[in-house]
Image: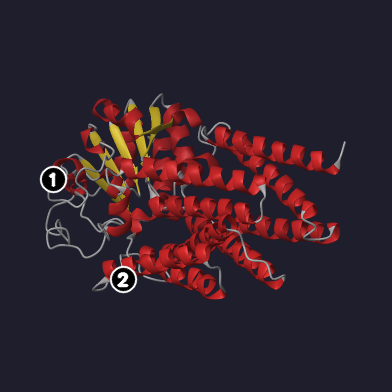
Amino acid sequence: MSISVLIHIAYLIAAFLFLMCLKWLSSPRTARSGNMLGAIGMLIAAVVVLLDQEILTPGLILAGIIVGALIGGIMAKRVQMTAMPQMVAILNGFGGAASGLVAAGEFVRLAGIFEIPTVDNAISIALGAAIGAITFSGSVIAFAKLQGLISGRPITFGGQQAFTLILFLITLAAAVGMAVSPSYLFLILLLIVPLVLGINMVIRIGGADMPVVISLLNSFSGLAAAAAGFVVSNPILIIAGTLVGAAGYILTVIMAKAMNRSLSNIVFGAFGGEKSAGQLGAGEDRPVRSVSAEDAATVLAYAQSVIIVPGYGLAVAQAQHLVAELMKQLEARHVSVKFAIHPVAGRMPGHMNVLLAEANIPYDKLFDLEQINDEFQRTDVAVVIGANDVTNPAARDNPDSPLYGMPVLNVDQAKSVLVLKRSMGSGFAGVDNPLFYNEKTMMLFGDAKKSVQDLVNEVKNA
């Protein structure tokens, strides 16, 4: 069997593993195995490509695998779950940067041997460079916002829409120019202008929309990789990039739908910016019902059904393992416990699912919004831990609210509501939550980890 045939078989195996990876990632039960299949497929693809193209020697490939595995392993161990969205964002950026560099490198290579790229190749170079640059700069800004290095609120200025349009038109003109008459000038424009375009696109997006933005940038990184695959005529890179691009786009659309907003509104709407007078401190003088952990635990211990709604505050406090212990204590008292997961809870797609899986909470106890929303009205206690915007009834009842129309978890329809929060501060969207002032809502203030620990202790003694 020839080397060429073996290479194509390896590509086929890698492509099959990528497809199985996506299929298994669709279920929490098989997600870990799916992730492993994807990693194995990527390892096969990377090694075969480098050997096939004679880019590196086997020794250098092995060294790269060892160094990369060490870096990845350290990151996986040291990065906290609360910082996972930042890591995903920056990894998207690295993918975009790599694709852009591949496109630029291929142009330089061809120019060095005095070849003029074909029209097809020139278009691929233009797309790889432009999409890669947008992905890199946009992802860096997303990382900075999530990490708190810059404000999480939309950063806007006069004429920003026009500036964005000008940058896009220059990028488009440079891409056409590259296809018609390839030159270093067009390559430089395709690397620099999209960098500014990516920055300008993401700085205007508020923190509440970050899960959608991360998903969109993930899609961009896939498209950039696919374009790079066309540049170097590599089928497995085209397949992998297309799968990532398509999967990222589908997820982006699903999440936008979950927020009842269009993708263009998310990208260009600057949601989560300045608060109106009606939103800022709207409930500062309204009474709230503060309770002790002992009183809250008594309500939980003698309930028949409890639905727990996790949010970003749970991730920040790293209280997922204690929540699992609370679930076990309640179930020992024959209390039915379920978890309600909003599609955009947290700071990245699937953030809450991953968090609860880390605490070994059974997958069959996790329910998405459509599955569980009708059950709140039959539930004794809804426990909200660090979630804010996704439980705001104003999204359902108040046409004047910026959240109006966004599907939310109907926790206010439960017989009693227990909210664990540090303070009365608003969520990432900067919108006041009327749930906190509802007459059947109990507020347990403090760090989520300590509050849940106190609940566990009190339930044991109830």
Q: Position of residue 127 (x, y in %)?
A: 51, 58
The disc at residue 163 is 2
Q: Is residue 33 above or below residue 84?
A: above
Q: Is residue 25 above or below residue 303?
A: below
Q: Position of residue 160 (x, y in %)?
A: 28, 70
The disc at residue 246 is none
Whether residue 343 is visible to the viewer of this picture, yes or no, is no
Quadrant assignment, res 166: bottom left
Taking the spot 32% from the left edge, 60% from the top edge, the residue there is: 206
How crowded is the residue under tag 2: few (<14 C-alpha within 10 Å), some, or many (20+)?
some
| For residue 4, side relative to residue 92 (left or right) | right
- The C terminus lies in quadrant: top left
Q: Position of residue 23 (x, y in %)?
A: 56, 32
The residue nearer to you, when weighing 21 against 170, is 170
| For residue 285, side relative to residue 422 (left or right) | left
Quadrant assignment, res 165: bottom left
The residue nearer to you, when weighing 394 against 261, is 261
Q: Position of residue 273 (x, y in %)?
A: 25, 63
How many numbered markers are drawn? 2
Quadrant assignment, res 24: top right
Whether residue 251 is visible to the viewer of this picture, yes or no, is yes
Element on which disc 1 rests = loop
Task: Name the kind of residue labelled 1 in the image.
Answer: Asn
The disc at residue 398 is 1
Taking the spot 21% from the left edge, 50% from the top edge, the residue there is: 433
> Marks 1 and 2, Cα distance to the nearest angstrom?
34 Å
Observer-side mark, 1 or 2, equals 2
The structure's colour scheme is: secondary structure
Element on which disc 2 rests = helix
